[in-house]
Amino acid sequence: MAKIGYIRVSSQDQNLDRQISMMQQFKIDKLFQEKASGKNSNRPEFQKLLDFIREGDCVIVTSLDRLGRNYEDIKNTVAVMKQKQVSLNIMDAPFLNFNTGNDLLDTAMFDMFLSLLSYIAQNEREKIRERQRQGVLLAKEAGRYKGRPTDYALNSKDPQKRLVYKTVIDMLKQKIPVAEIAKENGLSRPTIYKIKKANNL
């Protein structure tokens, strides 16, 4: 039996250090790790994990939401693991690691708690989104909402994007058609129009 860990964060600017530290106590045989949103069910390292696991293995994750962003995704993943006769250890939900000696009872209890936890997690995400939406509306009403910062701007953190921005500005000043500017710089036309509007060109 192999102990296989899977850790994930949702974006490139987050780090995996905390989850790596948590995994060390389990003496993992193989660790899959990636920076990818849970909304994407075709995460490369996650797919490698599903291909790698064999009967008798134990997959260890720090929390249930590492497997996916909604109940259906998580349920499908657990179904695949069950089909391969692989056990699942969720660190922050040890009560899901049933071992009554009755496989049918263990499965029924696991499914029941999994459904409940998945519902709670999904409901909490929807509440967060609703609070964010309300916050944006209030900020707009107060005239404080500036929207998401554009990737292509004079103050962009990415020097390559700053260069592209300057190129777009120069081309707009030369009255080059938006479609041509977009194609030349590998950008969408809405992005070019946004830059054009922001600079009154």
Image (cartoon, rainbow, N blue to C red):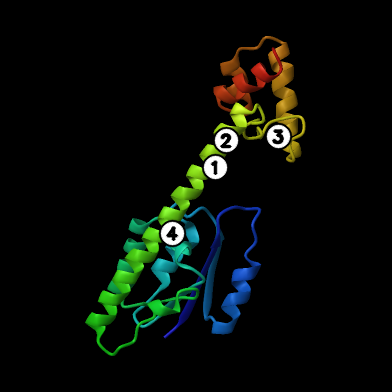
Q: Do the numbered discs 4 and 1 sit on residues whose CB atoms are within 8 Å?
A: no
Tell me the tag on residue 121: 4
Q: In this view, does 154 lie above or below 18?
A: above
Q: What element carries label 3?
A: helix
Could you tell me how far apart the alpha carbons at marks 4 and 1 are, in whole angstroms? Answer: 17 Å
Residue that badge 1 annotates: 132
Residue 30 position in % (x across, y down): 52, 76
Label 3 vs label 4, nearer the camera = 4
Mark nearer the N terminus (3 vs 4):
4
Residue sitting farthest toward the bottom: 101
Name which residue type carries label 1: Gln
Q: In this view, does 99 lie above or below 121?
A: below
Residue that badge 2 annotates: 136
Could you tell me how far apart the alpha carbons at marks 2 and 1 are, in whole angstroms? Answer: 6 Å
> Residue 160 versus residue 17: which sits nearer the camera?
17
Residue 160 visible in the displayed image: yes
